[in-house]
Amino acid sequence: MNAHSTSPAFKENAHRALHDPALQRALGNVETGFIGRRKSAADKLPEFEALRDSARDIKNHTLAHLDLYLEAYEAKVTAAGGHVHFAPTADDATAIVADICRRVGAKTVAKGKSMISEEIELNAALEAAGVQPVETDLGEYIIQLRGERPSHIVAPVIHLNRDQIEADFRRVHTKLPPERDLSAPESLLAEARGALREKFLAADVGITGANFLVAETGTSIIVTNEGNGDLSQTLPKVHIVLASIEKLVPTLEDASQMLRVLARSATGQEITVYTTFSTGPRRPADVDGPEEYHVVLLDNGRSAMLAGEFREMLRCIRCAACMNHCPVYHAVGGHAYGWVYPGPMGAVLSPSLIGVDKAGHLPNASTFCGRCESVCPVRIPLPKLMRHWREREFERNLSPAPVRSGLAVWGFFARRPRLYRFATRAAMGALSLLGRRKGRFGALPLAGGWTDTRDFAAPEGSTFQARWSAERRAR
Amino acid sequence: MSAQPGPRPRVGLFATCLVDLIRPSVGFAAAKLIEASGCDVVVPSQTCCGQPAFNSGDRRTAKALAWQAIEAFEGVDYVVAPSGSCAGQLKKHVPELFEDEPELSRPADAFAAKVFELVSFLVDVRGMKAVDARFDGAVTYHDSCAGLRELGIRAQPRALLESVEGLTLTEMKDSDVCCGFGGTFAVKYGEISDAIVAKKADNISAAETGTLLAGDLGCLMNMAGKLQRLGRPVKARHVAEVLAGMGDEPAIGEPQGR
Amino acid sequence: MTPREQILSTIRRSLGATGAEAPRRTIVADRLKGHGRGVIPARAQGRSPEGLIALFVEMAEASAATVATVRSADEAPAAIAEFLRAHNLPAALRRGDDARLVGLPWERTTIDVSTGRSFGDDAAGVSAAFGAVAETGTLALVSGPDNPTTLNFLPDNHIVLVDAADIAATYEDLWGEVRGAYGAGTMPRTVNWITGPSRSADIEQILLMGAHGPRRLHIVLVDPNAVAETTEMDATLAAAGSTPAETRVGSTLAGDPKAPERDAPTPPAGKPDRREADRGHEEDELDEALDESFPASDPPSQTQP
Ligand code: SF4
């Protein structure tokens, strides 16, 4: 697949984001909402940390036996009357979905929220096949109206303010009387709800993602607060589940463990409003539900990730806690990352999926503050994995030249302690003289990234090692 | 101050390159505190813990520098650094660097086991409960990331600061949130780093104290540099300076006046 | 090579396995059959039946559902009529063919009852729950002609009858019940866990109720050990009016004006002590914590920061 990404322009994206006042205002909502809610949910459950261990172990176990769990899962889906389609690449997945839509003569498709759908750029593929996809999650719906990508994997329009959303609705919902007051978020919601109701009832195919797949029973699980996923999968005559292969867990009990950490980490809820377990199509006596049930299992590079140091990333359950707690995400928002997955999880995953040559900035644009790892429900060591990407970039000479040469010079001296002591003593003495009057520098060569916006403290004078040996010798 | 019975342990002070180069007084403050906890201090020849290389993906240089440190501190009972970041590198990441090399991983692990960040060494290892120091004024304390999340340092500096005569500690909002330093990140992604430290500077100012303390010179230089550029009257110091009663020397980025 | 083989063989290459190794197969087979439980919150464990009911009600209300308790299923139609009246809703509803719903004395009310699936024209849908989970105040509904799934999502008001005896402590206990009913390894087409009414916080992280699914979730809890309170319930519901955003109206347990000192479900006659003891201050703390973390039931003014 030819992924459309602006990740190589991360710096420029970030620059624009930092100078976008509306975006900066909207990003304030990330910090004020998610962090406190997650914390109080975690504090209220004494077993939360133990559950995180449990969730990590379940995923590790499943990944280590993924081939066998996939086989077991497939057999159960088939036994329940469903169909499993294997899609090695994004293009394979979109082709499978488009074929199903074409076969049943679908005109419109109702879609629940799915990051996989974004990853494989399904909407574009469906449109090309003459099928109109309709996003039904409120946030995704707004995103679709704007022709954007979500900027957050749980809250797709966290980058927008209500006035921007109102403007979009007025632009697209042409039947909307101009005098109708849409300034309150409630009226925006009511407007979207009304518009989408019709779409649900008219859709021929419903597509949802899956938060988990259960091997024991061939069940796919979605969690939503809106209920849009359920309408998407209940009303149309065909339900297609789009899921990547690492969504598997062994049993319903294992899924329950995962669900206990998912909502708390994502939105700070005890549990999401709707947790739906779907197994196969409608049964003979049923009066509603889809007549066909398909699961498209996407690989797209994941089976290869199992081999190396990035296997741990496949534990990710897409809760977004890492980005909610990330100072870099808070500063620049999700679009700056330039592809589907933003924040720390994106900084690790995107290079795997679209190549480190394209996404090379992402694992570098981190302070390694470690807050992401400290909240990740499946304990993915995100900074460590970002560092692994930096190592790969370094090995492949992909890191920027000034950084490499700066480090090389530093490394040269640091590995020669005597030379280092001699050189640094002289250099610090000189620098200290230069900065003596103010005690700091307003500009320094090669450090413009720092001194454009911050002063740089001048050295006190001699080095510690020099002073120490002088003073201790004198005693 | 407290001292444990028995022979005085030998502590190798790992000053860290920033302290060595920019602010030697932190090294002297650290030495004073370690001695007050009943230890002897030595300063083996040293350069850098290798973290900048490690975090830039240059494992080879990181390993070379780590091994250099392991050898330099061979004869000491403890290795103590006035920095959560460098101590974290030596304690947590040096073993990772050698984990695939059985011959080297044993000495690396043994070395890592004796590494401590200064304040946690004083409190957790030496049982220090109070310091003999005076500092008149209100301070606010920033929890540097590596110290907080890699080494669990949070209560220790606050406990010792409590014992400083004349000092009151006012917590700032989000004291546990990164200041945006991140080593080379501060230069490579200067604009983002600046946006993060600008928020931090506002939180520091809002605490309305005259002084900002932290346990890592890199973060302190970043925050001090921003506060100074913004013309905010807050002075920044390493927590060791205040704990050692050396809080009357010029603050970070202030003229030396000597 | 088929796409299936391609994926499986790459996985196996990555894992250094062939897929034929007997020990690996045994591990997986045992795991799938074992239904091993992981970490179970103490919150829901070791409770008396009354304690479980109390926890269920508390958690359900914290999720912005409303709960009315009746002593026998026969009282359910009246309770439902009261709920509809209190919210100025038409006296009409749609239900499935669940035996627990069919046999109720609907004729004692003026409600116009229709049956079958919903096509989106119903103001109220009524379902009977397969079970419930006390741990988080979650209802468990299974699909089928008895309880069509469309009734859970299309009507603006979802009313769910749940038998107090069907309240399980934890999710794991619930799965035990499902396996008992459907057989291990087999599932009904859909199991819906429902915890509170539909909502969205997509716009500026402001929590709004009734996104696509029901704006209100009303639980009629059939608890033979509860004290009958019909008259008080009437008063509460009538007083509560029908402000749409007031998600807590209609709760006979949290907002009874005639018994302001009581915040617990009514103790069953004859064993009040036990019920009181179950609700120790552990639950008061829970109350506070829940209030903090579930802004779901915030008054509308909160949505205009
Ligand atoms: S990496 Fe962890 S914290 Fe981030 S989305 Fe995935 S599971 Fe959540």
Image (spheres, coloured by chain):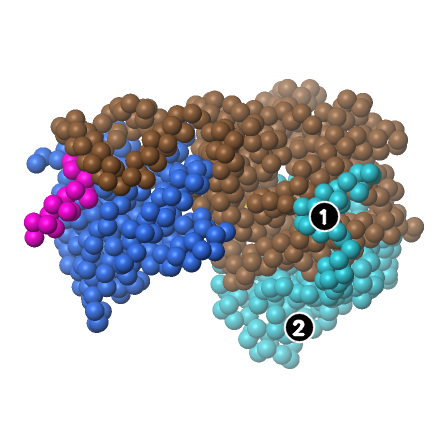
Chain colours: A brown, B blue, C cyan
Q: Dividing the picture into quarters, in which one does residue B195 lie?
A: top left
User: As drawn, is A121 to the left or to the right of A417?
Assistant: right
Find residue A451 and report its horizontal and vertical position in percent. 30, 26
How far apart marks 2 and 1 lie (CA) works out to 49 Å
Q: Amino acid at mark 2?
A: Pro
Give the labeled residue for mark 2.
Answer: C49
User: As drawn, is A443 to the left or to the right of A216?
Assistant: left
Q: Amino acid at mark 1?
A: Arg
Q: Secondary structure at mark 1?
A: helix
Category of crowding for the residue at label 1, using alpha-carbon neighbours closer than 10 angstroms: few (below 14), some (14–19), many (at least 20): many
Magenta span of residues: A459-475
Give the labeled residue for mark 1.
Answer: C12
Category of crowding for the residue at label 2, using alpha-carbon neighbours closer than 10 angstroms: few (below 14), some (14–19), many (at least 20): some
- Labels 2, 1: front one: 1
Q: Nearer the viewer, residue B138 or B255?
A: B255
Q: Quadrant of the N terminus of chain B?
A: bottom left
Task: Identify the residue at horizontal 55%, vertical 64% (top origin).
Answer: C263
Task: Identify the residue at horizontal 56%, vertical 31% (top origin).
Answer: A356
Find out whether residue A469 is within the magenta segment: yes
Q: Nearer the viewer, residue A26 or C155?
A: A26
Q: Dividing the picture into quarters, in which one does residue A112 lie?
A: top right
Residue at the far right in the pictured view: A284
Above or below, A387 relative to A277 = above
Find out whether residue A341 is within the magenta segment: no
Ligand 1 shown in quarter? top right
Tell me which chain the residue with mark 1 is part of: C
Tell me which chain the residue with mark 2 is part of: C
